Amino acid sequence: MRTSRPARVGQYTALLAYLAFLALPFLWLVSTAFKPPRELGSLHPTWIPNDPTLANFRQAFDEQPLLHAALNSLLAALAAAVVAVLIATPMAYVVARRRTRLTKAVTGWVVVSQAFPFVLLIIPLFLVLKDLRMINSVPGLVLVYVVWALPFALWMLAGYVRAVPPELEEAAAVDGAGRVRTLVSVTAPLLAPGIVATALFAFITAWNEFFFALVLLKTPQKQTLPVVLTHFIGAEGVADLGPLAAAAFLATLPSLVVFAIIQRRITGGMLTGAVKS
Amino acid sequence: MRARLLALVLLLLLAGCSSGGTRDDGRVTLRFQSLAWQKESVEANKDLVKEWNATHPDVRVEYVQGSWDSVHDQLLTAFEGGEAPDIIHDASDDLADFAYGGYLADLTGLLPARLKSDIPQRSWETTTFGGGIYGVPFLQEPRVLIANATWLRRSGVRIPTPEKPWSWPEFRRITEQLSGRGKYGIAWPLKEPVSATLNLSLSAGGQLFHRGADGKVTVRFEAADQVVPRTIHAQAGTDRSASPTTLGSGGSDTLPGFFGGRYAMVPLGFSYRQQIVQQAPKGFAWQVLPAPAGAGGLTQGVSPQTLSVAEDSPHKKEAAAFIDFLLRPENMVRLALGDWMLPTGTRALNDPALRTPEHGWATGTALAAHLRPAPAQTVRGYPEWKDKVATPALQEYYSGAIGIRELRQRLEEDGNLVLARYQR
């Protein structure tokens, strides 16, 4: 079906407007990060700083252990993503392929679990982790992130598994491939984009997470980036805007880089090689 | 090969994740959670911790950075889990729940006489709950008027001083005189209108919360309580001398308009001077003026910053000794300068560094004697009254959506229903 020219123009306009809507806050953040204090207080703000400076970055690094916090965040987010995907993938396969009462109950529980507010969970979680001697440790935080990411990861991956035609697995079986061989050689490659997307989701969720990290990590050496960012905010919401913007800009970079690297895997041929020749 | 690489990465991750326990060398280690956030303030706190550690080898203090934004939830969880820091930096209006909940140590017998006598009784009242002292109030800030000095001088209006402040009616006349042609005499940043209104209302003799013989508190919105709200309402709605657009803004949001010559004055906390020094355009002349006075003089309510000791701390005596060190007069001055606030200690307040006219320090210190506990500090149920009743009611009143009669009805009738639930 061919799209008419005016419709195409409309589509592109809408797309551009959406992109602009998404990009504006980020561009403003970048602009703010390079502005000296006097420009931050200007009644007529400009997109491009008149007198760009790196002073905000210097101040941010001088005042807070940003690199150390970024490393903690990276470790927690990577570990959470890897572990969540390792656990969620076989679970998702069962949920998607075996339609029993149990899998329906599991799916229902997944949906319900998403409705629990953080505040409700944090104190029991804190006590459990304390008994496990995992308070103030990145592994403790990773455990929480994995548990937190699992329901949605399972939900996401189950959708990807359902998109893989069962006929392909049946064809492999007809060709003599065993169960494990079929899963490893046929299903897993087709699921790769879904696994990558799910890992990305788990990574970004953990990378951005604030409340659990705030409560569970006590010493400055263990704190993650979102927690350290709040140190630029004072009482009644007053903020040291320049360094905060500089630190926040740096905090967004890893997510962007990871996404840029991985997005080709997500979009690149969901069912590449799926057709049996 | 890939599998090996993955295994190696996982191994490295796990190695990196392992928690490094603290070295047990037999010394007492206290954790001090500070909420200092401005560069100078963090530096002052860290320097003082270093100085303590250098002179007290047996009691080591570990500086832990906290955040104002989330301190209540973070502390609550830490208290519940028995993992609270030994020394806790907070604000007095956040202490009541923790004190009544048994999470904070009663410092009555732990503080030295020097510290007790140095801080005035009115400040101790902000941290005294049920007869016990649950925090040491050490920094506070009055609300002041930050004014465009050039604009005020050219207009020829009388410049107020702490000795001869503006009255509320005079203040209203002057803001009207300063307004016109798209410019306003004042910009009220009233994103959170309740504490600003209540604290300033003390100057007009307002009290709002009345404790009966039975100890129960009721809300009465009387004539004195109405002076400040009526003034702001008239400035924004009748006189057009207050910018209507800033009523929903925070303090920092008003600064660009202030620097840009849109408003002659902005009522802000004393510590905002730091932002003004940083952000004001070159050559911009500003000055600090006292807030207007009424029947109660320059009195206004404050919730000082505090230092407390966790009830669970096994080293309360050492923690109190560290607080005593941190709040020696010369150290209190350093903390006050770092935070651009006023110390509560009388000896620190007399330090020449805090009496200089530069950046309005002298005006601020002249106001210190008039600061009183914020009216609602010890009222149980106040947070709910504030969020559910007072905030929306005052916001609607200031925007002109409701009149004073409905404001009064909501503050009193709805408000007393809320408070009654906490006082059964």
Image (cartoon, coloured by chain):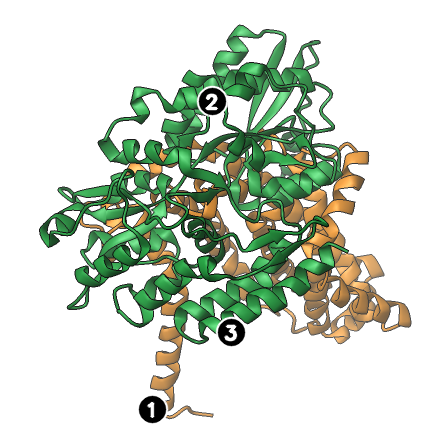
Which quadrant holds residue A105? bottom right
Q: Nearer the viewer, mark 2 or mark 3?
A: 3
Q: Is residue A5 left or right of residue A263?
A: left
- Where residue A177 is drawn, which disc sits there? none
**The C terminus of chain B: image quadrant:** bottom right
- Residues indicated by labels 3 and 1 sit on the same polypeptide chain: no
Label the orange chain with its letter.
A
Q: Is residue B39 left or right of residue A143?
A: left
Q: Residue at x 66, y 30 (%)?
A: B15
Label the green chain with its letter.
B
- Residues indicated by labels 2 and 1 sit on the same polypeptide chain: no
Q: What is the spatial separation of the Cα atoms under label 3 and label 1, in whole angstroms?
A: 54 Å
Q: What element does badge 1 sit on?
A: helix
Q: What element does badge 3 sit on?
A: helix
Q: Is residue B2 left or right of residue B391?
A: right
Proximity of marks 2 and 3: CB atoms separated by less than 8 Å = no
| Residue, far left | B154
Residue type at mark 1 is: Pro
Residue type at mark 2 is: Lys
Which chain is mark 2 on? B
Relative to B263, say whether B331 is above or below. above
